Amino acid sequence: MMPPGSGRVIAGGGLHATLKVPGGNPAVASTFEVVVPPGFDVGAHVHRAGQELFYVLEGELDLMAFEPQARTQGDWHEWVSSSSGQRFLHGGPGSLLFIPPGCPHAFSNPTSEPARVLFQAAPSGHEDYLDELAALLREAKGRPDPAAVAQLRRRYDIEQLTALRNPAPVTR
């Protein structure tokens, strides 16, 4: 049981996540509350073995989880599902994004206001990746080298498909 605002904060360069349930025994998933800043785009990527769930609590996000007709570089917002013809979903509070293993996915905040999401990653341990990503973002003042992000993601079994975008340098 946790009161509002409790948990371990993981922050840097625009990333702000609060770890609510850490990985390990007995948790099979890590659970976070994440604030997605305006303009942030995580970039399309794939986890070979992991699965994730995002539930929008406040604000609006563009959400995508499907195999596209073509995995093009650039903007994943242009992608079209190979099976349904669907494009990304622009969703507000109550919108859900479930990502099974091996499914390309992405999210971004196209608005001028932060969005808040409940995020769960399985298997547990995603907090280690977020710790390293926050450090990378801090060191780069919010503008990391795309090759450095791709290298970090490869170490955590994440295949980078399009670049992470953080629109404004962050000084904190």
Image (cartoon, rainbow, N blue to C red):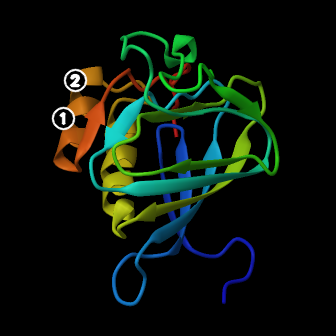
* Residue 158 position in % (x across, y down): 28, 42
Q: Residue at x 17, y 47 (%)?
A: 155
Q: Residue at x 36, y 17 (%)?
A: 71
Give amino acid for label 1: Gln
The vertical placement of 84 against 79, above or below, is below
Give amino acid for label 2: Ala
Front-most of residues 66 and 143:
66
> For the residue labelled by badge 1, is the local secondary structure a helix, a strand or a loop?
helix
Q: Is residue 99 left or right of residue 158?
A: right
**Which numbered marker is on residue 107?**
none
Q: Residue at x 34, y 39 (%)?
A: 46
Front-most of residues 135 and 68:
68
Marks counted in the figure total: 2
In the rendered image, which quarter is residue 128 located in? Answer: bottom left
Front-most of residues 15 and 116:
116
> For the residue labelled by badge 2, is the local secondary structure a helix, a strand or a loop?
helix
In the rendered image, which quarter is residue 5 located in? Answer: bottom right
Q: Is residue 105 left or right of residue 132?
A: right
The vertical placement of 32 against 27, above or below, is above
Question: To which residue does mark 1 refer?
Answer: 151
- In the picture, the quarter occupied by the N terminus is bottom right
Q: Residue at x 28, y 55 (%)?
A: 49
Dot 1, how many residues are within 10 Å of its Cα: few (below 14), some (14-19), or many (20+)? few
CB of mark 2 within 8 Å of CB of mark 1? Answer: yes
* Residue 111 position in % (x across, y down): 75, 25
Front-most of residues 65 and 144:
65
Question: To which residue does mark 2 refer?
Answer: 147
* Residue 96 position in % (x across, y down): 68, 49
